[in-house]
Image: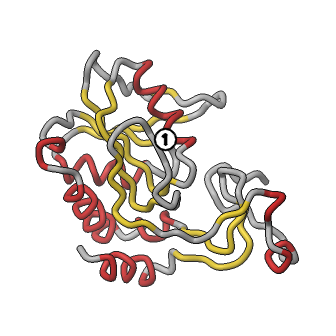
Amino acid sequence: MSEDEILAEFRASQALLEGHFLLSSGRHSAHYLQCARVLMDPMRASRLATATAARIPRELRQQIQKVVSPAMGGVIIGHEMGRALGVEAMFVERPTGTFELRRGFALSKGDRVLLVEDVVTTGLSSREAIVAIEAAGGEVIAAASLVDRSGGSVDLGVPFFPLVALNFPTYAPDEVPADLAATPAIKPGSRAQA
């Protein structure tokens, strides 16, 4: 799948939003990619997962025994990646603020795991999920995401395979440009507060 074809999928689903957004990382942006919209069509989600799996070198793909993703944003793409790779998929969630496996999900000691996210910006959620996976006995051997918003700077401690890189500028709270600051920020992500 070419970058143009990938972006066409995002445009067709109206997944790219414009405005003033407070990202879950705490940074501000004039763009927000609502991956839930691009994944709401099961056939589109399957195409995107298959394309993402194809980015992972064959030798590494063949080692993957489980897919784990952080809830909520990574659940659908994680499930579809499990299907694309022919392995079980599960997710970690934060019932008390720290990621953990629940709902009867379990890893066997040494299970080789692919961590799958929808969007990676700073890598914070990914690194927190990796800690939880390792605490549960898994070994994260690679990570993948639909979108890398880090500008190529994220270091997850394992090989990282995004489907596409979208490098919209993000700003620390004290760096927000005046024109963007003039518009109230919306918290669209999974950590949005009421």
Please provide percent x and percent y for residue 186. Answer: 75, 66
- Which residue sits furthest front? 153
Q: Measured along the vertical axis of the image, is residue 85 above or below residue 91?
A: below
Q: Residue at x 39, y 60 (%)?
A: 146
Q: Nearer the viewer, residue 112 or 177?
A: 177
- 25 sits to left or right of 150: right
Residue 24, image x and y in percent? Answer: 66, 52
* Badge 1 amino acid: Ser
**Which element carries disc 1, helix, strand or loop?**
helix
Reply above or below: 102 against 90. Answer: above
Tag count? 1
Give the image quarter of residue 139. top left
Crowd class of label 1 (few under 14; some 14 to 19; many from 20; radius 10 Å): many
User: Which quarter of the picture shows residue 185?
Assistant: bottom right
User: The N terminus appears in which quarter of the rendering?
Assistant: bottom left
What residue is at 38 percent from the left and 66 percent from the top?
A: 164
Residue 172 placement, left or right of 63: right
Pick the residue in front: 193 or 137. 137
Where the C terminus falls, by quadrant? bottom right
Q: Residue at x 29, y 34 (%)?
A: 141
Task: Indicate left or right for 133 with 191 as reference.
Answer: left
Identify the colour scheme used.
Answer: secondary structure
Q: Is residue 187 left or right of residue 128?
A: right
Q: Is 175 rendered above or below residue 7?
A: above
Q: Which residue is mark 1?
A: 126
Q: Residue 70 in the image: x percent, y percent? A: 48, 42
Query: x%, y% of residue 165?
Result: 43, 66
Q: Residue at x 28, y 51 (%)?
A: 81
Q: Relative to the observer, which residue lies in front, 45 or 56?
A: 56
